[in-house]
Image: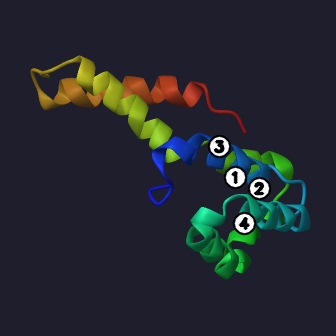
């Protein structure tokens, strides 16, 4: 997205979501071709997608539910964000054990929300 103008990013992302939300690899490739026609001013960006399509399209080997998890969340980043949220709210911990206990309890609360 760093190569896409700020004013075009929302529209570009909307088209990109059609690509990731496609039901199959073939439909996704059609959506990418459509994007190339609609976004000619960003041709180098889309050309790089075409050049790397074999690697990028591996994503479509997974079922819809798994693909949805892959493109909508990043579990590690979310986990770290929740830990930072807890540690930032308290500026100073009196001892290292206080920090460890706080992180331990936070991790327990975070993992309660996880499902298989």
Question: Badge 3 is on which residue?
Answer: 11
Question: Badge 2 is on which residue?
Answer: 19
For label 2, the crowd category at 10 Å Cα-Cα, with few meaning under 14, some 14 to 19 and many 20 or more, is many
Front-most of residues 39 and 21? 39
Front-most of residues 114 and 15? 15
Q: Find residue 53 and report its horizontal and vertical position in percent.
A: 71, 76
Which mark is in front, 1 or 3? 3
Q: Which residue shows up at 69% across the image and 33% down it? A: 115
Q: In the shown orientation, is residue 26 left or right of residue 58?
A: right
Label 4 element class: helix
Question: Badge 1 is on which residue?
Answer: 16
Question: Badge 4 is on which residue?
Answer: 36
Rounded to the nearest whole Å, what is the CA distance between mark 1 and mark 3? 9 Å
Q: Which residue shows up at 40% across the image and 39% down it? A: 80
Rounded to the nearest whole Å, what is the CA distance between mark 3 and mark 2? 13 Å
For label 3, the crowd category at 10 Å Cα-Cα, with few meaning under 14, some 14 to 19 and many 20 or more, is few
Label 2 element class: helix
Front-most of residues 92 and 16? 16
Where on the picture, by quarter, is residue 105?
top left
Front-most of residues 45 and 59? 45
Mark 2 or mark 4, which is nearer the start of the sequence?
2
């Amino acid at each position: 997205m760093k190569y896409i103008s700020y004013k075009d990013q929302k529209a570009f992302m909307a088209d990109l979501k059609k690509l990731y939300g496609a039901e199959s690899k073939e439909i996704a490739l059609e959506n990418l071709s459509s994007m190339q026609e609609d976004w000619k001013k960003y041709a180098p960006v889309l050309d790089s997608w075409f050049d790397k399509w074999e690697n990028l399209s591996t994503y479509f080997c997974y079922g819809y539910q798994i693909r949805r998890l892959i493109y909508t969340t990043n579990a590690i980043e979310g986990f770290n964000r929740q830990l930072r949220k807890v540690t930032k709210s308290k500026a100073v911990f009196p001892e290292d054990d206080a920090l460890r206990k706080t992180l331990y309890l936070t991790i327990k609360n975070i993992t309660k929300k996880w499902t298989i």
